Image: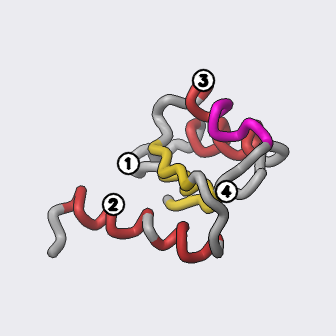
Amino acid sequence: MIIPNKDGMRFLPALLPALKAQAFADFEVIVVDDASHDGSVEWIETHHSWVRLLVHRRNSVSWRHAMQGQPQRVADLGVP
């Protein structure tokens, strides 16, 4: 699952534990951060080390950064 994040700290404390608590556990969560300034990256690193983070230090168009998570997942699956 790819989650784009731009200063989304207010959503993460509910979202990430809910994903972790799912009965179906055969999935990976990739958060693609678009230069957040609200501490969300640090919070994820501290409280949810099971989440893969792709962090962009400069702001861009969120959908472009979110799409960068897709090749990460496809490469992990061994799909050309």
Horizontally, is 72 left or right of 46 in the view? left
**Is disc 4 in contact with disc 3, using a CB cutoff of under 8 Å?**
no
**Would you name the residue on which mark 2 appears?**
72
Q: Could you tell me how far apart the alpha carbons at marks 3 and 1 are, in whole angstroms?
A: 23 Å
Name which of mark 3 and mark 2 comes first in the sequence.
3
**Would you name the residue on which mark 3 appears?**
46
**Would you name the residue on which mark 1 appears?**
26
**Is disc 3 in contact with disc 1, using a CB cutoff of under 8 Å?**
no
Mark 3 crowdedness (10 Å alpha carbons): few <14, some 14-19, many ≥20: few
Mark 4 crowdedness (10 Å alpha carbons): few <14, some 14-19, many ≥20: many
Tell me residue 76's x, y (percent): 24, 56
Q: Nearer the viewer, residue 79 or 33?
A: 33
Q: Could you tell me how far apart the alpha carbons at marks 4 and 2 are, in whole angstroms?
A: 17 Å
Horizontally, is 54 left or right of 44 in the view? left
Residue type, numbered disc 3? Thr
Q: How many marks?
A: 4
Q: Main secondary structure of the magenta part?
A: helix
Q: Which mark is residue 5?
A: 4
Residue at x 67% of width, y 56% of height: 5
Q: Nearer the viewer, residue 3 or 41?
A: 41
Tell me residue 52's x, y (percent): 45, 44
Q: Which mark is residue 7?
A: none
Q: Could you tell me how far apart the alpha carbons at marks 2 and 1 are, in whole angstroms?
A: 16 Å
Q: Could you tell me how far apart the alpha carbons at marks 3 and 2 are, in whole angstroms?
A: 22 Å
- Magenta stretch encompasses residue 80: no
